[in-house]
Image: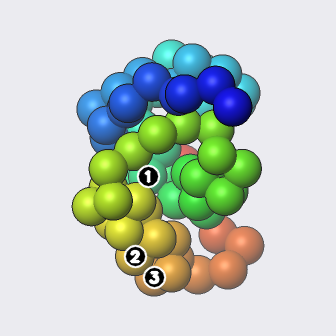
Amino acid sequence: MEKKEKMSLNSIFEFGKYKGKKLSDILKSNPGYLKWCLDKNFFNLSQLEIEEIKEVEQKQEPGVESVV
């Protein structure tokens, strides 16, 4: 399996509908999308950042996507 580059919430998303956006901005607008990416193993984040994404995603109302 290919080792993924270590990323942080300050990293720039390089694919998909949020290409060119910071992960931290995506976390604010659509944490469920980042959770989905984590579940699919699209990138490598620290355990602390993974927990932050999961926490924010759990607090968001189901089916709600904020506009940035």
* Quarter-of-image position of residue 56: bottom left
Q: Is residue 30 above or below residue 1?
A: below
Which residue is pictured at 67% across the width and 80% down the height?
A: 62
SS type, badge 2: helix
Q: How far from the left and from the top, in percent, is residue 3?
A: 54, 27
Question: Looking at the image, which is closer to me, 31 or 67?
Answer: 31
Kindly identify the amino acid type of the residue bearing the numbered disc 1. Answer: Leu
Q: How far is mark 1 from mark 3, CA to CA?
A: 12 Å
User: CB under 8 Å between callouts 3 and 2?
Assistant: yes
Q: Which amino acid, by three-letter code, is at mark 2?
A: Glu
> Badge 3, how many Cα within 10 Å: few under 14, some, many 20+?
few
Residue drawn at point x = 64 percent, y = 46 percent: 41
Which label was assigned to residue 59? 3
Q: Name the residue carrying label 2.
A: 55
Q: Secondary structure at mark 1?
A: helix
Q: Is residue 54 visible?
A: yes
Q: How is the image coloured?
A: rainbow
User: Where's the N terminus, which quadrant?
Assistant: top right
Looking at the image, tell me whether mark 1 or mark 3 is earlier in sequence order: 1
Q: Amino acid at mark 3?
A: Lys
The percent position of residue 11, horizontal first and vertical second, equals: 35, 27
Q: Which residue is mark 1?
A: 27
Nearest the viewer among 67 and 13 is: 13
